[in-house]
Image (cartoon, rainbow, N blue to C red):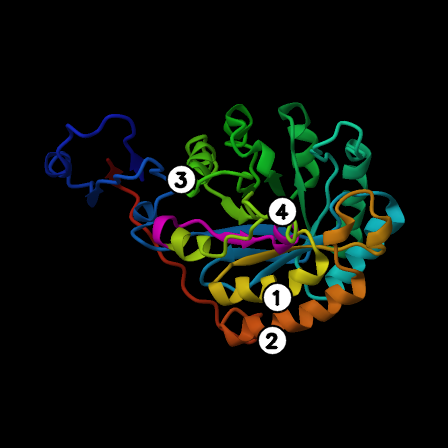
Amino acid sequence: MIGLVGDTESLNPELIQQISPAIEQVLRVKKPFKRASLEFRYGEPSEVVVSTPNGLVTFGQNHPLVTVAGPCSVENEDMILETAQIVKASGAQFLRGGAYKPRSSPYAFQGHGESALGLLALAREATGLGIITEVMDAADLAAVVAVADVVQIGARNMQNFSLLKKLGNIGKPVLLKRGLSATIEEWLMSAEYILAAGNPDVILCERGVRTFDAKYTRNTLDLSVIPVLRSLTHLPIMIDPSHATGKSELVPSMAAAAIAAGTDSLMIEVHPTPAKALSDGPQSLTLPDFQHLMLEVDTIAKFFGRGKPCPYATALPKVSYATNFAIV
């Protein structure tokens, strides 16, 4: 695929088509997010395949639902290992946990940094779960990439363009969370930065946006974004009902609604003792509540055709896309 970006209005697709018989098709993408656009993939969804110790996990529209779970931040070894064991036993494929935490207050817990990354690596070794953790600063990128199977860009860094540019050659997928007040197009343009930098593996995560009513929910979960994104982009979609609602009792219903709306993945915050959590305790499920939720998730996912694959199922043939055409 050859993408032509910039001012391409004067270019004639028919003339480009005649340059060489090696050019199979020329498409004009009118959206500003060229590589993230649905047209870039002939209208077909893309998939992000992640290698974990437990095997390959695929994020994508035509694949089983992927569940990511864990605490807001990594607090100590016992806590993260206990959580990881339950997360795995409940059927989730990834452990999330913050080593570096962006907080509104400079006096709030900021995470344990590199020592927390070491604990995530320990949990990965003990359980085989994939690791998703956030990078906040380019100076920490190498340390995060060494541990993470998927590198998270948080809502506050969605438009940190210098950081996004550095994600092009890290060799790991990127989970891009929507900014607190970002429009859908701004979000997709941030994804475009990563794609244009050379990294084709981007997952979009909706985690709620800031609206008028902050009394009853932390943010407003925009589930309408799922069908909108389906019409605009080929990238996989994740929903984070924990950050969106800010209240653990609201998470199960919003997780169910997200599956019904067609999400490819869920991110759920879990903590052994939420009341004692150093960050985001009110939105974290207890370990028993998470186990119960996963039973519900499994049933709903199967109903909507996103259940776990039968072990005897035959793998579908992978679609082969043309390699020689121009995006104008």
Quarter occupied by residue 129: bottom right
Q: Earlier in the sequence, mark 3 or mark 2?
A: 3
Separation of residues labelled 2 and 4 (CA atoms):
32 Å
Q: Nearer the viewer, mark 1 or mark 3?
A: 1
Three-letter amino acid code of the residue under disc 4: Ala
Q: Which residue is mark 4?
A: 214
Task: Identify the residue at horizontal 53%, vertical 23% (top origin).
Answer: 162
Q: Which residue is mark 3?
A: 185
Separation of residues labelled 1 and 2 (CA atoms):
13 Å
What is the x, y in percent for residue 183?
44, 40
Which is nearer the eye, 222 or 306?
A: 222
Three-letter amino acid code of the residue under disc 2: Thr
Three-letter amino acid code of the residue under disc 1: Ser
- Check disc 2: other Cα within 10 Å, few if <14, some if 14-19, many if 20+: some
Which is nearer the eye, 137 or 249?
A: 249
- Residue stretch rendered in magenta on the structure: 231-245
Residue 253 numbered mark, or none:
1
Which is nearer the eye, 94 or 21?
A: 94
Q: Which residue is mark 2?
A: 299
Secondary structure, mark 3, is helix
Q: Earlier in the sequence, mark 1 or mark 2?
A: 1
Q: Nearer the viewer, mark 2 or mark 4?
A: 4
11 horizontally vs 100: left or right: left
Q: Is the C-beta separation of discs 1 and 2 under 8 Å?
A: no
242 falls in the magenta region: yes
